[in-house]
Amino acid sequence: MSKVSALYPGSFDPPTNGHLDLIERGAKIFEELVVGILKNSEKVPMFSLPERLDMLKTLTAHLKNVRVEAFHGLMVEYAKSINATCVLRGIRAVSDYEYELQMALMNRKLEPSLETVFMMPADKYSYVSSRLVREVAQVGGPVRGLVPEVVEQKLREKLEPAYRFHDEMNGESSHTASTRQNKRKKRA
Ligand code: PNS
């Protein structure tokens, strides 16, 4: 099999364990994998582009054939500019399929030489999405196990009032919560 460079594009707002699982799987089968974060001027993200770049670089530092970059504009044009011949996308459930199929076919229309490859993340992440993580975190809900620890910490920092309120309502003093958070920071 010839050596293939692939692009894994997405919003990653924030990166989840499902994303990381897919990156690790992709890194095993592609010679080079570029994680491309879309700089989308239409949507206001929860995490800025530098924050997402920073998180994903930290999370993939152990994968020597993976690099993280930002892109804007058409994904197929960016793929071409980095010599990627494959696009990697994750499919969690049948519900993802329709949107992904449409996107893959549109991308093929735009650039016939670029192949889309679908991979499944581990089934334990099949319900995890950035949107749902944001929804849970915005009201101070637990996201442990859904996102990597560095992302969990960032969410707690960004949404401090929501987490403080949630922890207090659930009988956990803000002191206990911040002690727990500090312990986690030291471990990281
Ligand atoms: O993680 P997401 O938000 O589902 O990723 C969607 C993404 C970034 C892959 C898609 O929106 C994209 O490629 N946008 C770039 C603009 C583009 O090329 N649009 C045509 C797609 S058919």
Image (cartoon, rainbow, N blue to C red):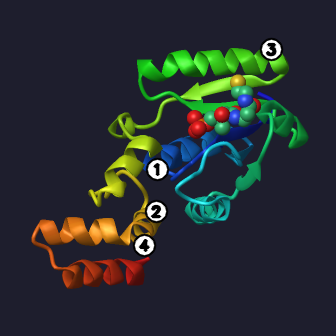
Q: Which residue is mark 2?
A: 151
Amino acid type of disc 3?
Lys
Q: State the separation of the CA atoms marked 1 and 2.
A: 8 Å
Q: Which mark is residue 157?
A: 4
Amino acid type of disc 1?
Thr
Q: Which mark is residue 16?
A: 1
Estimate the x, y position of residue 127 in percent, counting from the top left.
Answer: 35, 35
SS class of the residue under badge 4? helix
Q: Of the residues tagged 3 and 4, which is closer to the observer?
A: 4
Q: Are marks 3 and 2 in contact (CB under 8 Å)?
A: no
Q: Residue at x 33, y 71 (%)?
A: 161
Q: Residue at x 61, y 40 (%)?
A: 26
Q: Which mark is residue 128?
A: none
Q: Quadrant of the N terminus?
A: top right
Estimate the x, y position of residue 73 in percent, counting from the top left.
Answer: 80, 39
Residue 29 sits above or below residue 111 on the image: below
Q: Quadrant of the C terminus?
A: bottom left
Q: State the separation of the CA atoms marked 4 and 2.
A: 10 Å
SS class of the residue under badge 2? helix
Q: Quadrant of ligand 1?
A: top right
**Left or right, residue 148 beside residue 81:** left
SS class of the residue under badge 1? loop
Q: Of the residues tagged 1 and 4, which is closer to the observer?
A: 4
Q: Which residue is mark 3?
A: 109
Count of residue discs: 4
* Residues packed near mark 1 inside 10 Å, few (<14), some (14 to 19) or many (20 plus): many
